[in-house]
Image: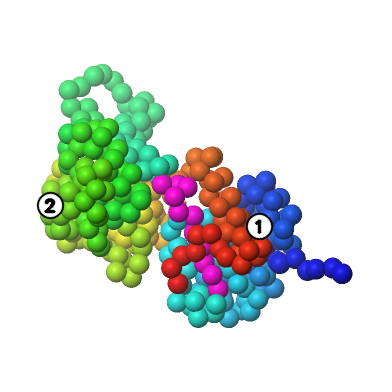
Amino acid sequence: MTVNKPRILVARRIFPEVVERLRTHFEVQSNDEDVAWGAAELAERLADKDGALTTGSQRIDAQLLAACPRLKIVANMAVGYNNFDVDAMSEAGVVGTNTPDVLTETTADFGFALVLATARRMTEAEHYLRAGRWQHWSYDMFAGAEVHGSTLGILGMGRIGQAIARRGAHGFGMRVLYHNRSRLAPEVEAECRAAYVSKEDLLAQADHLVLVLPYTAESHHAIGAAELARMKPTATLVNIARGGIVDDAALARALKERRIAAAGLDVFEGEPSVHPGLLEVPNVVLTPHIASATVATRLAMASLAADNLIAFFKEGRALTPVPG
Ligand code: DGY
């Protein structure tokens, strides 16, 4: 008797060895080109599938789910899952999973790298050098802001926020302030050497503010013109969370008018498009959503997404389901 294997769609190009492992358990259709399918192409390919491995840029909403009656699970290769309409998925009985823990330290490393690069004007200085403009040493050439001993502000104090706090407090002797929906347990605050403050105080006191909160309807434009106006004119802002948390148009204006000193951005509203105002100003470090991009971490993320699909179909239980 032939038993039909569940059908899985791998929606973006990922590690071939992970796709091969999936093929030992499932009938797999994979996107092997380095191109993102549009919503209609995705729906067409998902229509006869039981599960999907996505990367965080494929929107899973009621319209798509209506076209995919067999779909039971979508495994995101990302810790963020704002591409999931979780209510529509719950209603359709589709489980969503993400990849927590495996990217925490790597993403925190990158967040801290952006704090340093932004405060110390590294990419601005590199562009100057590459353009052949370096003539001589000058006392104020690319003079930036101190990182060690300064005040690090963290908005969103989940796993990644805590990992950034530890780097700042233990590695750079920074005073760490944070704001979060709920206050951390005293022992976690002590371990991170982080103090809880209101959002207003965080904005007013941070020398370097890092955004690490999930993107939800409540956090949309959590940093807009009003919040930027509360920050110190010498402050820097780093966003490694999601575009949409920052009003990029307001940020571009604030950077141009030097209402804050600089920004480091790994995520953008409407990415891969970047607000033209951000491309015009020199005082911003821009990277293309690569905070978790080390070979080992991306492999761990892809493997956990695959493990979720395997556990779900073999054992009836996903390993890291997102709250429904
Ligand atoms: C995540 O895991 O949410 C990242 O943003 C995707 O790399």
As displayed, is residue 267 above or below residue 124?
Answer: below
Q: CA distance from mark 1 to mark 2?
A: 46 Å
Toward the viewer: 154 or 181? 181
9 displayed left or right of 187: right
In the displayed structure, does residue 305 sit left or right of residue 100?
right
Image coordinates for residue 290, horizontal then vertical, percent: 45, 46
* Residue 44, percent from left and from top: 65, 72
Of label 1 and label 2, which has the lower sequence position?
A: 1
State which region is magenta.
94-104
The quarter of the rendered structure image containing the C terminus is: bottom left
Amino acid identity at mark 1: Asn
Residue lying at 56% horizontally and 45% vertically, measured from the top left: 299
Q: Is residue 316 visible?
A: yes
Provide the major secondary structure of the magenta segment: loop
Observer-nearest of 62 and 142: 62
Residue 66, quarter of picture? bottom right
**Residue at image coords 28%, 55%:** 156
Report if residue 99 lies within the magenta region.
yes
Quarter assignment of residue 28: bottom right
Q: How is the image coloured?
A: rainbow
Give the residue at mark 2.
Answer: 204
Q: Secondary structure at mark 2?
A: helix
Residue 271 in percent (x, y) is at 43, 57
Residue furthest toward the top? 136
Q: For the residue labelled by badge 1, is the local secondary structure a helix, a strand or a loop?
A: loop
- For label 2, being within 8 Å of ligand 1 is answered no
List x then y, in percent, for residue 256: 22, 49
Q: Give the quarter of the figure containing the N terminus.
A: bottom right
Contact flag, marks 1 and 2 (Cβ < 8 Å): no
Q: Is residue 263 above or below residue 72?
A: above
Tag 1 residue: 31
